Image (spheres, helix red, strand yellow):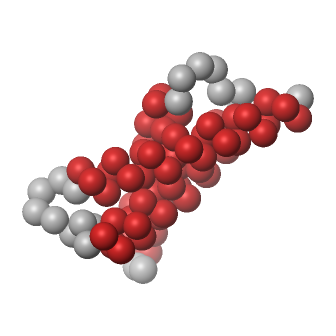
Amino acid sequence: MEVTGFFAAIIIGLVIGALGRLVVPGKQNIPIWLTMLIGVVAAILGTLVAGLFGVDDTRGIDWIELALQVAFAAIGVAIFAGAYGRRR
């Protein structure tokens, strides 16, 4: 992965984290940095899974890849919100 690809993945991950947080109903008591970290990991996982299904490189916008990334982010936010909320 090139340096520009790495920075692009981080920026896309930040947006994916925010989208994942919006998809999860209710209030999430997790810090914003954790949401961003979840988004970056979800973006990477979504791209890997999309690659396994062969839908990672399509013409136009990769809607399936984006949906996978947001789904992973929503799952991650829900898991960490539950775990983080119980710690407090």
User: Which residue is pictured at 72% across the width and 27% down the height?
Assistant: 29
Which quarter of the picture shows residue 81?
top right
User: Which residue is pictured at 61% across the width and 40% down the height?
Assistant: 77
User: Which residue is pictured at 51% across the width and 46% down the height?
Assistant: 73
Q: Viewer-proximal residue, 25 or 6?
A: 25
49 versus 71 height, above or below: below
Name, please, the residue furthest toward the right: 88
Name, please, the residue furthest toward the bottom: 1
Location of residue 3 in the rendering, given as x and y in whole percent from the top left corner: 44, 75
User: Which residue is pictured at 24% across the width and 50% down the height?
Assistant: 63
Location of residue 15 in the rendering, given as x and y in whole percent from the top left corner: 43, 43
The quadrant in which the C terminus is found is top right
Residue 31 lies left or right of residue 3; in this view the side is right
Location of residue 34 in the rendering, given as x and y in whole percent from the top left corner: 67, 44
The quadrant in which the N terminus is found is bottom left
Location of residue 27 in the rendering, given as x and y in whole percent from the top left corner: 63, 20
Residue 35 in view (yes/no): no
Name, please, the residue furthest toward the left: 59
Q: How many numbered marks have been drawn onto this rendered protein structure? A: 0
Which quarter of the picture shows residue 4?
bottom left
Which quarter of the picture shows residue 84?
top right
